[in-house]
Amino acid sequence: MEITKHFFFNLSLLMVILFIVLVWAEKSSKFRFSKVCSFAWLLFMIWICFQFSFQPSPHYFFDLRLIPVIIGGLYAGLGLVLGGSVILMRSFYGIEPGFYSNIFLYLPLGIILWKLYPWFWKQAPRKRIRFSVIITMFLSVATVLVMEFSVPPQNRFDAWFAYLIIPSLGVFMITYVFEFAKKNLDMRENLVRAEKLEAVEQMGAAISHEIRNPLTAAIGFVQLLQEQRLPPRKRGEYLSIVKAELESAEQVIQNYLTFSKPSLDKIEEINVKKELMQVMNILKPTANQNSVEINAHFALLGSIKGDRQKFHQCFLNVIKNSIEAMPRGGQLYIETHYSSSQITIEIKDTGVGMTPEQLQRLGEPYYSTKGSKGTGLGMMVVFSIVRAMSGTVRVKSEVDKGTVFTFTFPNYKSEIHKD
């Protein structure tokens, strides 16, 4: 069984080379080889087959060079080039009967594979594998017949078994691996394409979500401005709020927050009580619409360092979510606590609450407890802003009992001392 042993050794080497190629392709993220790159690897495989050939006589080399020629011809369209390469490489070992046998076999094979290449890729993956194995079996039979006429083997069973079984097995294994790798690559590319499309859609929805807050408030105050008996003082106050909210919407469009680490455009001292009061005034119409009573208790002192516009955006998101978590009405508590080193802001509602699983995923991109009504980006923006302003946030929640957000920021005076 000398021929069979050599063929199995040849096949093992080809599979090792294939494994190296696939690993290299995976690491370099270039699985779709160019024809030049494919030709180089296939030529190397043919050379390996020649180097470890079985020679029953000085003029004949028995090996599996047929496999890389068929694989390269059908999958890369290199049949004619590889067929010519085999003939050229065989000429280096001498111009004798074995060389002419190679011309007789590989020149027509190269032309046939070159012609079949466009048709081959129109077939389904299973048909491609099946056709590759069938053409290999046919060529193996042709090779054995040529061998019978030119140099009859001493052990016919060994020769027939080696040529009829091992090349077909090798082609089946390699084509199956190729099709499997191609299928995974196509799935990965489709997934990446779908994720990019989803990211674009979610980005559009997120920007809409962020702009909707100030625009909703502006529309509410515009409706109040339409009342004929509105005192001039109130009218001026409402107009100031409408202007501020429209400016906020414009700012969101021009400089939308990056999710991982938003930049603070303007660092300034923020009076926590004053800014939270303004946020409350903006959301009062929404709270009244949902029958939510807002209870506020603010410490007399308390300033932090940060971006005022992003501070508004952060707490507009949180308070609005708390109000929406009480569709049948309820109580919303907003408190601040002052110490020499930090400012604590606590927002508590009596709404529907969250399960431990929902609480754990809060702040993940595209995850929302509102289902299809939410984008999942509002809370992510909140967490990002808090991090950018050197703060922390803790959330506690129980189903049907409500949710408590606790924000902690460094005191502005302590930050000055650190600087």
Image (spheres, helix red, strand yellow):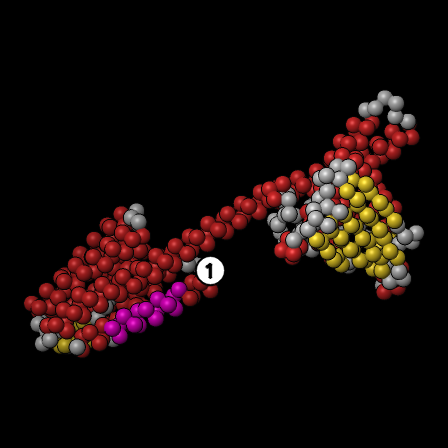
Which of the 4 image quadrants contains residue 419?
Answer: bottom right
Question: Quick one: SS at disc 1?
Answer: loop
Label 1 sits on residue? 29
* Up-down relation of residue 84 to residue 50 (above or below): above
For the point 38% across and 59% down, the residue is 181
Is residue 317 visible in this depiction of the protein?
A: no
State which region is magenta: 8-22
Query: Could you tell me which residue is drawn at 44 percent across and 59 percent down?
Result: 30
Which quadrant would the N terminus be assigned to in this image? bottom left
* Residue sitting at x 85%, y 53%: 336
Where is residue 393? Give x, y as percent. Answer: 75, 57
Q: Where is residue 18 in the image (x, y as percent from the top left)?
A: 35, 66
Question: In the rendered image of this protein, does residue 99 appear above or below residue 299?
Answer: below
**Residue 155 in which image quadrant:** bottom left
The one of 285 and 71 positioned closer to us in this rendering: 285
Q: Tell me: 205 left or right of 125.
A: right
- The dominant secondary structure in magenta is helix
Q: Residue 323 vs residue 131: left or right?
A: right
